[in-house]
Image (spheres, rainbow, N blue to C red):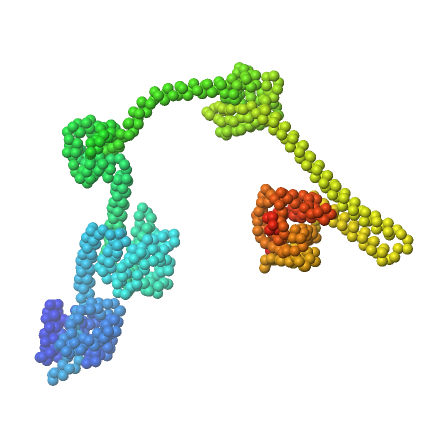
Amino acid sequence: MPEREVSLLSREELEAEVRQLRERARSGSMDAARQNAVFESTLDFAIVVTDRQGTITGWNSGSEHVMGWTAEEMRGQDAARFFTPEDRANGRVTYEMETALKNGRAQDERWHLKQDEERFWASGEMMPLRDEDDRHIGFVKIMRDRTTEHLAGVALRAGEQRRQALLELSDQLAKYNHDTASLADVASGILGRALGVQLVGYGLVDREAETIDVERDWTSGGARSLAGTRRFRDFGSYIEDIKRGETVVVGDARTDPRTSAHAEALEGISARAFVNTPVVEHGHLVSLLFVCSATPRQWTNEELLFIREVAAWTRTATARKQAERTLQAREEELRLVADAQPVLIAFVDRSLTYRFVNAAGESWFGRAPDTVVGRNMHDLFGEGGVAKRRAGIQQALAGETVQMDLDWPWSDGGRRIAAIRYTPRRDASGSVDGFYVFAQDVTDLRDATALLAARADTLAHEVAERTVERDRMWETSPDLMLVIDFDGVFQRVNPAWTRLLGYAPDELIGHHVNEFVVPADHVGTTEAYTQAAAGGQPRVVNRYRHKDGSVRWISWSAAPAGQMTYATGRDITAEKEQAQALEATAEALRQSQKMEAVGQLTGGVAHDFNNLLTIIRSSVDFLRRPNLPEERRKRYMDAVSDTVERAAKLTGQLLAFARRQALKPEVVSVGDRLRGVADMLDTVTGARVRVVTELPEHPCFIEADVSQFETALVNMAVNARDAMEGEGTLTLRLTCGLPMPPIRGHGGGPGPFAKIELSDTGTGITEEDLTRIFEPFFTTKEVGKGTGLGLSQVFGFAKQSGGDVSVQSVVGEGHCLVTAQSAFGDVQA
């Protein structure tokens, strides 16, 4: 056939020629010129010839037309050049050559590459080439570009797949009755399978925090779940688009400017390509549907539309399910509320059929509520019962609320009165479609009402009697009674005013109360009626002038009622005079006791000072003698000095008792001082008295005059020694950081205080002496063996130093003196 004829062959003829070429190539019956003409003229068919190793030796015009390379560019190249990278990696060329040798041909339909790296879908086959001796000399691969048909088929299949997916989604959403999160899971799975992606899910969006909270999602192909809270900014800047309610479409995270800087993070969650569809409610962004592909992907308009449809359907179904659940929950709640009521609640439609009855209905109908529903009023009450209710039923169906009382016996025949209310219900058009029934057992209430009505006359009679009794009490009461307004003006008085103060009612009514109260008591009286005006119930004692000019003491109790104050006053003049006489007698007794104490104090001081002065005078007389030896002079001088020191000590004890001595307080370690005093007491108490100290391990500090503190300890120790008659055990005990307890009726203190105890094993102190041991000059010792000022000095020192002192004793078991002094928690020595 001439070349020109070959070039004008139709497509169908070319396909037939290629088939013949294949057959003749196998049989070797076609001449070379004919083969070359066909080889070069088939522009729609790419025919590539290779040697046995796959190196290209022939490249026709159709190959250049389909793939773009010229014959000169491709001869000597590996046939894998026009295969995709993935096919090269898995050895597709070798596979086709081996299959062609084995089976005589290797058919394939797959993607191949053009010169500009554009992919095209090729349909073709590879066959082995043999020479005249049937020896294998290479391969021929014949392909045709079927990209348009392939994409149309893919689109058709994808469209059908999406249609089927939407139908499946519709069916699932219609019948799915689980929680809304599971419903979203179903939609995600259908969407993911239809699109062939790796990750699909829903999440709640926090616009301000720029985060998405994913409860669960759908995955495939090894993708990991995104469950949890994720920050949008960790994956790019596209959150700004989402905030505007725009759908975000990314074909390749590596090249999209919004995600290129975060491509690695996106690929880590199988999102090399993705679509984010925001869900907006009432103008607010609430959630997001995300669809992710692990490989780059050019999302088609059909796919984006499909994603939006799934999102919209799912959102609508979710909202519907939520509404249904909310409605169901409210109905259940209303049922619970209705069943919890002790009254009958029911609904009757226009045919007088019960459509709802609450749990209380069982006690009204004598049967289970569900057996009442669907029954007509005629069946339940009979014609007579309906006749009693007919007027009310007609009014309710006419749109009026009806209330009535009916006898509605119990199922056992017992009497019962029902307060019944019919409330009409209207449908969406406003027409009455039935009425609610509310019935309450008011038998006891009606009986009580009747009883109250029966007792009304009796009560009125009793009130009249009480009024008479009240008036009789007002008239005969020996106490003053009055009614004054809130300004203190008399409004009413009882006859006792005339008997007690001599005033007739008309001399008081209209006058101010202070006109009859002595001026010194005006302020207290005014405060009392003012307090009553403010709602208080004051008590006050004041003095009133009798009409004859004398004064009477009156004790008042008052209370407000309405706009008036009611008060009762009792004459306590006699009690006041008795109290004054008693007070005068008590004062005289106190003065007598005071004079006795002063006498004791004066006598004791005079006696002690007289003895001291006698020693001083005698010593001075001896010192006046001439030629007095130096030794004796020194002895007399020492005697004078010792006597003066004793006098100063006596004066100090008196001042301490009076709490007027001049103290020099300083911070003292109590434990160290107790140890020092204990060592000194060994010489004071004698060998037969054992001195024991019990001290805490941590230091304890107080602020006190060291000299007076040690003197007080010695005085207590000497007192204990004398009580033990020179033999026994004296214990000094220290406790720090305690509150001070109440002593002799005085309030204690929160502390911290140091408690110093001196206890002995002596004879003890009698109960009557315990109340006097701190009195000056009181002593149980023989005359001449004690001044009685030792413990009074301890008492005065303790009180002046901010502490106190107490004593406990049991006769025959010894006694314990306790002094408490203010302590310092963290003072360093």
**Percent position (x, y) of residue 208?**
38, 52
How many numbered marks appear? 0
Residue beneath the point at 58% across and 53% down: 737
Along the line of sight, which residue is nearer the eye, 596 or 236?
Answer: 596
Horizontal side of residue 217 vs 40, given as left or right: right
Residue beneath the point at 62% across and 58% down: 692
**Percent position (x, y) of residue 648?**
76, 49
Along the line of sight, which residue is nearer the eye, 817 or 819?
Answer: 817
**Percent position (x, y) of residue 162?**
20, 57
Along the line of sight, which residue is nearer the eye, 111 or 488?
Answer: 488
Which residue in the rendered view is the most extreme toward the bottom?
Answer: 133
Residue beneath the point at 65% across and 30% down: 584
**Percent position (x, y) of residue 372?**
18, 38
Along the line of sight, which residue is nearer the eye, 353 or 148?
Answer: 353
Q: Is residue 294 above or below residue 819?
A: below
Q: Is residue 292 above or below residue 535?
A: below
Which residue in the rendered view is the most extreme toward the right?
Answer: 626
Considering the image in quadrants, where does the N terminus appear? bottom left
Q: Is residue 829 above or below residue 576?
A: below
Q: Quadrant of residue 83?
A: bottom left
Q: Is residue 822 visible?
A: no
Considering the image in quadrants, where does the C terminus appear? bottom right
Horizontal side of residue 130 vs 501, given as left or right: left
Q: Is residue 575 above or below residue 218?
A: above
Q: Quadrant of residue 748?
A: top right
Residue beneath the point at 49% across and 18% down: 476
Q: Quadrant of residue 524?
A: top right
Q: Is residue 597 visible?
A: yes
